[in-house]
Each structure stands twice: as structure tokens, then as C-alpha cells.
Image: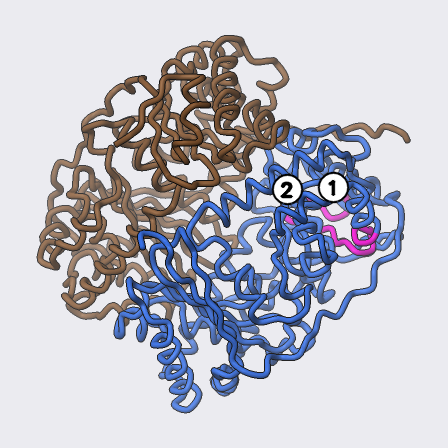
Chain colours: A brown, B blue
Amino acid sequence: MSVRPLPELIPDSKLKLPKQAERTLSSGLTVIAIRRPAVPLIELRLRVPFGRAPLARATLLSQALFTGTARMSSIDIAAELQTVGGGLSAGLDPDRLLVTGNSLAAGLDRMLEILADVLSDPTYPAEEVATERDRLVDHIQVAQTQPAHLARTALLTRMYGRHPYAVQTPEAEQVKGVRPGQLRALHADRVRPDGAVLVLVGDLNPEKAIDSAEKALGGWIGPSRDGNVPRTPELEPGPLQLVDRPGAVQSSLRMALPALTRTDPDYAALQLANMVFGGYFSSRWVENIREDKGYTYGPHSAIEHFVAGSALVVAAEVATEVTGPAMLETLYELGRIASLPPGEEELEQARRYSLGTLRLGMSTQAGLAGLASVFASFGLRLDHLREHSAALAAATREQVAEAAARYLAPSAAVAVVLGDADRIEAPLAALTAVERAE
Amino acid sequence: MKIPATKYPVERFTLDNGLRVVLTPDRTAPVVGVAVVYDVGIRSEPEGRTGFAHLFEHLMFQGSENLEKLAHFRHVQGAGGSFNGSTHLDYTDYFEVLPAGALERALFLEADRMRGPRLTEENLRNQVDVVKEEIRVNVLNRPYGGFPWLRLPPVMFETFANAHDGYGSFGDLDHATVADAEEFFDKYYASGNAVLTVAGDFDVAEATVLIQRHFGDVQARSKPKLPDFAEPDISGERRESYVDRLAPLPAVASGWRVPDPIGSFEQYLPYVVLAEVLTDGDASRLVERLVQRDRTVTSVGGYIGFMGDEYQVRNPTAMLLQAHMPPGGDADKVLRAVDEELDRLATGGLAPGELARTQARMATHLLRDTDAVLGRALPMAVLEAQRGRPEMLNDLPRLVGEVTEAQILAAAATLRPERRSTIEVVPGANQ
């Protein structure tokens, strides 16, 4: 059997950014339009600053945003959007209210008109709000039986203490008390154009698309309130927190580590260090606990960015009986990356992966829209991709080792494990101090 | 609103070893997608070996003729790309998306495992463990795990092929052997039973040379005869329930058999549109009735094929409706309302504009999926494997747009209670 050589890679072409335009309207709304005409569609993202908004009301508002306007019922809104192949939905994160949508390219103006009506003239009708409230309550009840949600909730509390980011899902009881009038008041107070960013991507002429947005959204006006969230607190390492889920066949391992913001000069080095550790499939941690040991299916480690701070979150679901050994390997791999410099080849591999996925992320309308919208939340534009690519290309082994030593050390981590406490407490306690959560 | 179309070019050819190739170049982004589809899926796995098609998919990543374990992942990701594979009822796909300069590498990797994966006891046992963790994450450790895709087929179907659990029992997975894997590869992973598709930023002539270079000497092996999985429709309403000890709220799903998606595509397609008329968005029939008016459900969805792959599934398959209910929800009441709405539709017809707006929204979804290179490479590979018509991807928005009101009404009229199979989730959490 002859050995066949692995084909060489043809070097990447220069990073090419799509044609785009930007304008900030007199209302304070920034509109960014990006041309990618590959399919005759438009992607829409609107992010409205929503930091420190009251959680139960804000969450219900995001679910009830399309329940009606002075002119249209919820069914009219949905039907009118469908007519142009369109759809709009809303969501909430701790910093923003996010509207996501798309339509046929020829439906751009109509989609913008409907969006404008919803933003500037909503009614939050009692019947529809009651329906959405009940649905949200049920949804929260279901989420509270999902291990991923429970582990996330426990980790956020452990990470952020009394900071607003600590709680990102309201209690069902709080939601039950929200009235339509409170949604109208919250909408009037916070769903404002000042500081909001609208991104349109697709088969469009950027200047003309912005003209359309200006025309449609001209009536959406009003000052915004200060929604700034205080900087996130430093993580306070301490005993591993064990959350009991009796009878669970898997344990949910979660760890949070400090991280840098996207614009920090050392960010590219930290990103590469995380890649080598556990940030992609061909990382040490995944190869170890999945491909060598078979403890888990989809472990992952990623840097999460919020406006008020960034964190690195490590997550794996592992069989109950190997919870201790899986934690052992996790601590070992974190300790190894924090203590020893990465190998040349594994660093190059992580670098090429990071540079490549950045290109893949820009290759669709939806990918571009997501990137441009997220970046804009942090005051960045698509050209940040160029700077970031350069930083990834330039980061040295020493810089990566230094970032790993500072940010990936297991002694700096806060850890939460959700699982069958009676079965996993002793194996975990053999490795680190453990306390049971309330 | 006029429904637009894409015009992705399609080049097809077949290598001497029987491998069918589909090329669809598009230079708007510097990326390529490579997909290999084998015409074998969950329905073909042997009795006593539930979950084997999926387990075997995992084994295809564990090294091959020129590649050590882990090498496949490292070579794709080290080229800046991403990979995955998935196992469906009627096919198994393997794919990469990469910067354009890595095309030849991806072809090399796919050709190498088409010649033969390294099937070892160690890799097999390791991947059985990984698959068990996958099943725990997706089924055993979460509420509504496997609902309804693993739960409804055994109610609806009689034969092992159509009814069994495609993720597999832990017992069957534990009993899987290297010899089983070798046999499965020999039987189903022949080049003549596969389709290779490349989509994205490449030159057709250059890619053709590369494909010939890497796949041309893959040994020709005979293609297995395509099994017929047909079985008669049920002869009366079927209904079962089970307790999900992790689920806090009740849920229900029903399925009705639909015409052959391939042999009777014209009769089949109206059901695909009907599912959207019934459940796509707040202005759809069942959302308006069940969620907004009756408030008997918190969500309702409708689709075709147990894995939601309506253009990539063979006969027999079903149209599914599934609903999650509030505390104390009554599945009977929900099913009665569904029957009423189907009757109302079949006898009263559609409202003005109702069909056109549903078709417009479906066109957006179809077009949106094709914007990604893998959104072309994967469906085209399956359309070639199952129909010999990869270019049909360009036609789907138009074909959906040509479905008439009369066809929708006729389809709705067949969804009778006596043709319905239902599975109900009884909540077992917090009780």
C-alpha cells in the first residue's frame, strides 16, 4: 500500500470586505447596509440597548413585541410579512433587545414599514399579551428541567454574584405578574432609536437601502435612557459548586475563567490559547476526553463577550460514572496550557482554523448580518475582521503562552457541576474543594 | 409577490468506478463545500444492530488508509475548515466547508476514507462510548428527548426498517463488532453507492482533474440493490402514550402517511406546503386556532419526514404535527380542533392570499438555505443520489409556488383521524 501525500493548501486570497454604507439618522439610529447579492433576499438585525431593563418585563416584551399595533393585529403583522416572504422575531440578551428577520429582496421596504409600525406604535393588546405571558411561563418551566439551562443558571449566579448579568431568565412567578400597561411603559421608555443599530444585508444597493430605512423609520424617535451596565466583577475562585439533580445520567461540567475584550491587544493570543486548549474539535481537551477516553460527546470552550465584560466558559456533559475522571482531565489540560508553551504545529493549526472560520463566517448573508450586528454592539465595524486577522496571524508562541498562563490557569476558575450529587460528590471532592449549592 | 429563483449551475459526471459527481461553482465567496453522500441510512441497518448506521458514521472519522486517528479532524480544521457528518433514514452524509485553497485537501480526505476506514476494536469501543454520551445528551438526560422522531415511528409502522430506534439501544451498540463494521462498509459504502458534490469557489475543469486524481482509483465495487421499505398504511387510528420522567408538561404528536416523495412527487409536494399553511407563523391556521384562540397549546409545528428533511426522504414517510401543551393540557381536545381545522380547510377552502403568502415565505426559507455552500452541496448530493436531479434545488421555490389551492384542499382531506397515529407525552417531572 503506497503512502499518498497530503495535498498542500493554496494560500488564502486577501480578505475582501463586501460593499457597504452607513448612516446615523437624526433619531440616533445607526443603519448599516451591506451588499451580498448571492440570493435575492434581505437579512435584518436590529439591536436596541436594553441593559438593566427589568428582566421579567423585558423578557415578556421580547416575546410580545409583534402582538399588535394601532393598525395591525398580530395576525395582520404575520400575514403582511409573509406576503413578502418575510418574518420577524425578537429576543433578549443582558445588553440588548434583538430583532431578527429576513424577506425576499423585493420585500425590503414593506418589511421596514411593518417593523417601523411595531417599534413606534405598538399596543400590546391584553388578550395577546396574556397568551404570550402564559406561553413564556410554560417555556420557563420546561427550561428549568433542561440540564443545560440549569447549569448555565448556576454558573451565571456563581460568576456574577450581584451584578445584573447574574440572572438572565426571570422566575415564572415574576412573569405572571406583568401587565400589558407595564409593557407599553417599558416600550416607551426603552425601545428607542438612539444608540440602536439596524443592519441590512443582502441583494441590495447599500445607499438606497439606507434611504428606505430612513424613510420607513423616520417616525421612530425619542431619547434613550442610560442603560449602561457596570463592569463585570472579577471572578472569585472558591470551592466547586455542586448542584444536585437526583438520578441524572450525565453531569454538566461548567467552568468560567477570566477573558479579554475583542479589542484588547492580547485578545488574539488568548483566543489562540483557548483554541489549543479546548476551543475546537482538534484541541487537546476534546481529543483527550472524547476521542481518547470517550467520556463525552460535544465538549466546548468559548470566549463570551458582553458589553460590560468578557469571560471564557468551558462546558461538557459527561457520563455520571466518569464525572471525577473527566474533571481530572479538564484540570490537567487547563494546567498544562497554563504552565507549558504550546507546540509550534498545534499553534499553527489553531491559527489557521481561527483565520479560516472567520472567512467562512462572512460567506453568507446571515453570517455577515450576525457579525456586523454583534460587532456594532461593541462599537466595531466589519473592518475589524482585517485587524483581527492580522493580530491572529502575528501572535507569537510566547504571547500565546503568556495569555494562557494569565487566563487559563485552573486556579483562577470558578466551577459548577450539575448532576447526581450523591454519586459524584466524593469523586469531585478528591480533586478539589466542593460545596453543595442551596 | 413574484417568487424568485436561483440559477446555480450544475455539472454532472460519473467516474469509471461508478462515483457520481456534481459540481456547482459560485465565486461570490472564497469558500468551498465538499459533501459525500452514501445511499444508506437508518432503515438499512440489520436487526439486532439498532443505531449501527450512525455508529458507523462515527467510525468513518477514525482514520483511513493514509490517515491516523485524529488526522481527518486536524487536516480539515488545520486548513481553516469545519467538518461533520449525519445519519438520516435513507442516507448518510459527510461534509467539509473550507477556504477555497483547501479544496484538494478535502477531496483527498474524502477519497481516502472511501477506500476504507481503519476499523479497529479500540476505535469501535471508544466511539460506542461517545455515541452513548450523544444519546444521553439528546435523549436520556433531557425532557422530550427523541420526541417525536424516535417515539412516533414504532406507533405508525410495522416493519423493523421503518419502526426501530435509529439512535440504537445501548445493548445493540455494545454488541457491535469490527466484523459488523467491515461488512457494512463492504455492502453499502461502494463508490457506486455514493455521490460527491463540490459547491463554491472553484474552477470546474481544475476540480474535475483533482477529483479524477483522488477518486479515480477508488476500487469499483457493486452497488447494493435499493431495498423497498414500503408497507401498507394503518387500518385504523393508533394511539399510544408514555411517561417522560423529565418532562414537566404534556405534549402530543400525530403522523399521517403521505404519497411517495420521489415516485409521486407531484402528489407529495402539496403536503409540504400544507404543513406550512397549517403551522408557519402567527397567521397560520393552527397557530391562530390552537395557540391564540383556544390556548390549548403553547406551540405547534408541522413538517414532513421524521427528521424534517422533506426533499431528502424516501417512501414511506409521514406528515407530522406536534404540539406542546400547558399544564393539564388535553390531547383529545387538541386533536379534535386539528380535525375541525382540517375539515374547515378541505371544505371551506383557503382565504384570499393565504396560499401565496405561505409560498413566498417558503421561497425565502429555501433560498436562504442555499446561500451557504453546504446548503447547496448537501441537498444536491442527496437529490442526485435519490432522484438523479441535483438541479432540482434551483426549481424548488418555483415548484412550491405552483402548488394549487385544489391540491392543498385535496391533501387536507386525506388527513383523517382513522389514518392518524398519535404519541402522547405524559409529564413525569414535578408530579
User: Would residue A168 be visible to someone looking at this image?
Assistant: yes
Q: Is residue A405 above or below residue A223?
A: above
Q: Residue at horizontal 70%, vertical 65%?
A: B389
Q: Is residue B277 above or below residue B195?
A: below
Question: Residue B118 vs residue A55: left or right?
Answer: right
The residue type indicated by label 1 comes to Glu
Other residues around mark 2 within 10 Å, as few (<14) / some (14–19) / many (≥20): many
Which segment is the magenta one?
B187-206
A199 or A76, which is in the foreground? A76
Q: Secondary structure at mark 2?
A: strand
According to the picture, the residue beneath numbered tag 2 turns out to be: B96
Per the rendering, the mark at residue A378 is none
Q: Tell me residue A238's x, y (percent).
A: 31, 17
In the rendered structure, does residue A224 fall within the stretch colored magenta?
no
Q: Residue at horizontal 39%, vertical 84%?
A: B350
User: Would residue B302 be visible to someone looking at this image?
Assistant: no
Q: Tell me residue A247's x, y (percent).
A: 42, 41
| Circles 1, 2 touching at the beta carbon (< 8 Å) | yes
Question: Residue B105 vs residue A244: left or right?
Answer: right
**How many numbered badges does the structure rendering display?**
2
B91 or B246, which is in the foreground? B246
Residue found at the very far bottom of the displayed protein? B347
Residue found at the very far front of the displayed protein? A422
Q: Residue at horizontal 60%, vertical 64%?
A: B394
According to the picture, the residue beneath numbered tag 1 turns out to be: B110
Question: Residue B27 vs residue A322: left or right?
Answer: right
In the rendered structure, does residue B201 fall within the stretch colored magenta?
yes
The residue type indicated by label 2 comes to Glu
CA distance for labels 1 and 2: 9 Å
Which subunit holds the residue at mark 1? B
Which subunit holds the residue at mark 2? B
